[in-house]
Amino acid sequence: MRDIRPWFQAKRISLRQKSARAAGRNFDPYPAPPAGVRLSPSLWHSQAMADVAVAMAWSKTDDGDATVWQQAARKKLEQFAGIGDYILYYAR
């Protein structure tokens, strides 16, 4: 035999929503999250990115050469990926 409790719960929420709407109030069936809980990873990432200093940034306003920056960035990428001298670049 099927459990009908979820059906009754859905009907109860629907009845509360309809009565709130009839009274001119807003109704949110979802409870508020507890304090300190981060449910959106993108909000956390944007906050974390704002606090990070960019060490390998380059822009056209820099006096340095782009190729020097590219070589340094490739070396750093090799270091992070753990591949070292196994990559052969076409540009070398």
Image (spheres, rainbow, N blue to C red):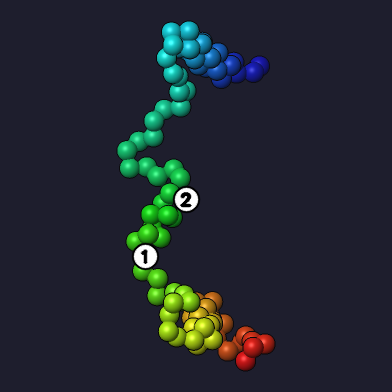
Question: Disc 2 designates what residue?
Answer: 42
Mark 1 closeness class: few <14, some 14–19, many ≥20 residues within 10 Å: few
Residue type at mark 1? Answer: Val
Looking at the image, tell me whether mark 2 or mark 1 is earlier in sequence order: 2
Residue at position x 40%, y 75% in the image: 55
| 72 relative to 50, above or below | below
Of residues 61 and 70, the one drawn nearer to the viewer in this rendering: 61
Mark 2 closeness class: few <14, some 14–19, many ≥20 residues within 10 Å: few
Residue type at mark 2? Answer: Ser
| 79 relative to 51, above or below | below
Q: Cβ–Cβ below 8 Å for labels 2 and 1?
A: no
Kind of element beneath mark 2: helix
Picture quarter with the C terminus: bottom right
Residue 12 point in image, percent of width and height: 51, 13
Res. 17 in view: yes
Residue at position x 44%, y 18% in the image: 26
Left or right placement of residue 81 versus residue 55 in this view = right
Give the quarter of the image for residue 27. Answer: top left
Residue 70 point in image, percent of width and height: 53, 83
Question: Disc 1 designates what residue?
Answer: 52
Residue at position x 36%, y 69% in the image: 53
| 21 relative to 52, above or below | above
Give the quarter of the image for residue 47. Answer: bottom left
